[in-house]
Amino acid sequence: MSTLFIRLPSQAAAQSLQPGMPLYCEFAVAGRGLEREGVAALPDMGELVSRAQRVVLLLAASDVTLLRVQVPPLSPARLRAALPNLVEDQLMSDPAECVVVADGSRDTMRTVAVVQRNWLEVLSRTLVGLGARSIAAYPSQLCLPVTPGTSSAAVAEQSGDIDVAVRLSAHEGLGLSIVADQQESAAFEVLQSLATVVREGPIDLYVPAPRLRDYEESLHIAPALNERIRLHADGWPRWLDGAAAAPVELMSGLGAAAGPKLDWRRWRWPLALAAALLLINIIGLNVEWLRMRREADALGAGMIQAYRNAFPKDPVVIDPLAQLRQKLSASQRGTGQLAPDDFLALAAAFGEAWNGAGQDAGALAGLEYRDRVLSVKLKPGAKVALEPLQSALASRNLSLAQSGDNLLQIRSGK
């Protein structure tokens, strides 16, 4: 899966740009490994964003406030609703204007990240407009390595604005926004500010590779800092690993508003084609139904007319086929012939089938004929092999149904 990582400057740096000037960001494309990296204006990343299956934002540390908050045992939905009230006393801004997200642990003490809602919404809308399918956002300070007893820090520079991400422990971090008076003294100011914030313990500081020598020279000026701060060239592999292990994902705080919207313009021709095919099928089905309905009406009218021609004295014709069967049965009875569903015909055929199937005549208790059905009563406890009897009756166009343990019903199949 292709993932686009974008390391963003701070919100303050973005707002300080002149109108019309684009926001430049560092980016990296990763699949099974690091495939591409560089710097580009955010509006010019449309091709990269649309090709990536996922976009991961690394927010500037100074834009995200991390708090350690004791939370009650609540369901995830109730916790999301309660978080703004839990952190209200620790914020200078209105919680309603912020996105507040807790980590996914089950501990009573949780790490809670707070970021300005409008900044996150601007980023979400921009990326969705560029074609993003899935968006995630992580605080930069929580993407730094965690080493027991050692603090981690990383420097990001953008047109004179310097953002320093600091990770003090697995759950604590902060961001420093530094504006250097002169470019030559920027590295020294960063080192001094970092040493002021992190008063004890060693510090692993990651700086842009082109600026590594400037930071090394600044360390030589202050021997006390040289003993505590270890310099490393920054690189994307470290950020990719850190983002995968970050405990807080901020876009989840926007809910469905952070997700990409369906672009109906992409689907207008497939949807139009599907609608056309559906319309053609509906028209075809209705035409076929009307044709078959006309054929059925014509066939019914022909049957009624044939019946009227054969029996002109019948004033009412409702079901010509059933009425014709009744006429034929009555005619057979009038000439002395037995109808297939007469008592004698059913009893004679049943007797032949019973004997042919090798059944015991002593098992029969009596016969009853009603509504063209012959009911055969069996003696209590009588055992009858139904399968051979059914086969024998079927060969005589009769059907057998068992009603209860001691009652068999014989019907004509015609």
Image (spheres, rainbow, N blue to C red):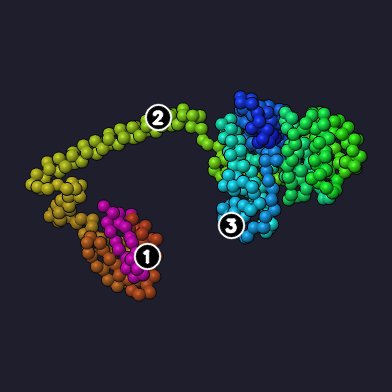
Q: Position of residue 10 (x, y in %)?
A: 68, 36
Q: Is residue 81 magenta?
A: no
Q: Which residue extends farthest left?
A: 313
Range drawn in magenta: 395-414
Can you say whether 40 is above or below 167 in the image? above
Closer to us: 145 or 217:
217
Image side of residue 4 versus residue 219, left or right: left
Q: Position of residue 240 (x, y in %)?
A: 73, 38
Kindly identify which residue carries mark 2. Answer: 276
Image side of residue 381 versus residue 270, left or right: left
Closer to us: 338 or 194:
194
Estimate how packed mark 1 is, as few (under 14), some (14 to 19) or many (20 or more) residues with alpha carbons within 10 Å.
few
Q: Name the residue type under label 3.
A: Ser
Closer to us: 304 or 136:
136
Q: Residue at x 38, y 74 (%)?
A: 381
Can you say whether 323 is above or below 126 in the image? below
Mark 1–mark 2 Cα distance, whole angstroms, equals: 66 Å
Q: Residue at x 24, y 67 (%)?
A: 368
**2 and 3 marks in contact (CB < 8 Å):** no
